[in-house]
Image (cartoon, rainbow, N blue to C red):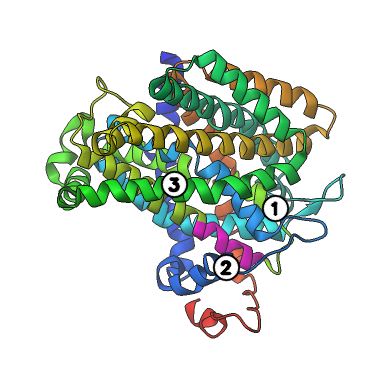
Amino acid sequence: MDFLSRLADALWNPWLLGLFLVTGLIYSVGSGWFQIFGFRTWWRATAGSLLRKSAPGRDGLSPLQALATALASTMGTGSIAGVATALTLGGPGAVFWMWVSALLGMMTGYGEKLLAVKYQRPGPDGGLRGGPMYYIRDGLGSPLLASCFCLACIPATLAGGNLVQSSSIASSLEAAFGLSRPSVGLVTALLAGLVMVGGLGRIAAVSSALVPGMALLYLGSGGLVLLLHWRAVPGALGLILSQALSPAAALGGGAGWTVAIRYGVARGVFTNEAGLGTSAIAHGATRADCPAQQGLWGIFEVFLSTLVVCTVTALVILVSGLPISPGADTGAPLTAAAFAAALGRAGEGVVALSLLLFAFSSILGWSYYGQQCLEFLSGRRFLPAYRAVFLLCTLAGAVWSPQAIWQLVDLSNALMALPNLAALMFLVPQVLSEPRPRPEINSPWKKNFKKSY
């Protein structure tokens, strides 16, 4: 695995890190920093619309179902285990760079979702298809790059979308309840298989049922921990900023700027998928009123998965006072120990249950992404074989080394990001010139929408 580590580090070099940030910066500047100054608009159009009943179109998902399916993958173990790993390897300063990548990534996510709907196509089963492979092929005019994206995405679904999730479920349940890791892997694979055979409709239905509850459980428990340790929160925030920006951090070697940025951006990308393009595949199955309106959900996803959920995880770990170093606990066990330090055994149970729900829903979302990429490359004839391999990876992930899996995740994410980011850079004019959504007559944000752009 030393080879994988060296290769991942070589790909996640300053040029790739800069490409993620520059892409988001171009979209942010071009939109007038809409994610900041248009907060009221996109918040009411997304979070506000959750209060209104949304029905699926006759040939696609509803926006809420697409959101749940996408969040099922973005709010996976990266929000719990990935943040802890970033803190361990990159220091508290890595959290700051997760924030930076998320702030810029909000507009990257906007562009991805907009393009996914703009270039969506009907599928062989009557549903809609969309995502990076379609806007790379039809928008950028490069079938070769579209195929490269799919070839990188398929192993990414097996690594970050499956092996990491299964490993985190098994390690968490083993630590909290003493359950056998192979047994946990077997049950997880069986349950995932039952959902996968039902297609996108069943995946969306299960995700819609799991995502709201798991988010409320985790955020509510994390908020309680921070409330109990509220005096330590300002110090934790100060530590994040000082480790990220101080001259001492810049010259401090292992936990300095370079390492903090590397792990902060890499883990931030894994938690919100902005720049990877994968969550756009779920939105490509949506019958939306207009592409730009669907793009607003891309902003909301990054905001919730990284700026909210990941920040809560990081602060809970930092206020716990637990040692943060490669030789101490890392990943899900570190997060569980931090919750337990404030809430006792109940804290471990909350993390175990949250991780179970987060990771299982993530497995479902990523399984759909892999199937769509394989269908794009070779039609539907190899889908049963992919499902079998995917479920075998669920079993393997339960007993494999988490550190080795994270190296595979970083490697596959880098290979997948390159063609997607290239397309996003060339398609900036199309995104920024796309006609704006037409608000509903009774929408409370109708008057504010044009002003926010």
* Magenta span of residues: 291-300
User: Which badge, 1 or 2, comes first in the chain's sequence?
Assistant: 2
Which amino acid, by three-letter code, is at mark 2?
Leu
The numbered dot on residue 284 is: 1
* Residue 102 at x, y percent in the picture: 41, 52
The numbered dot on residue 51 is: 2
Vertical comparison of 164 with 241: above or below? above
Question: Disc 3 designates what residue?
Answer: 217
Which mark is nearer the camera, 1 or 2? 2
Q: What residue is at 52 percent from the left and 19 percent from the top? A: 398
Query: Who is closer to the viewer here, 36 or 234?
Result: 234
Disc 1 versus disc 3: distance between alpha carbons?
29 Å
User: Which badge, 1 or 3, comes first in the chain's sequence?
Assistant: 3
Mark 2, other Cα within 10 Å: few <14 / some 14–19 / many ≥20: few
Query: Who is closer to the viewer here, 52 or 331?
Result: 52
Query: Who is closer to the viewer here, 290 or 261?
Result: 290
Is residue 409 shown left or right of residue 135? left
Disc 2 versus disc 3: distance between alpha carbons?
19 Å
| Labels 1 and 3 touching (C-beta < 8 A) | no
Which amino acid, by three-letter code, is at mark 1?
Gly
Report the quarter where the N terminus lies.
top left
Mark 3, other Cα within 10 Å: few <14 / some 14–19 / many ≥20: some
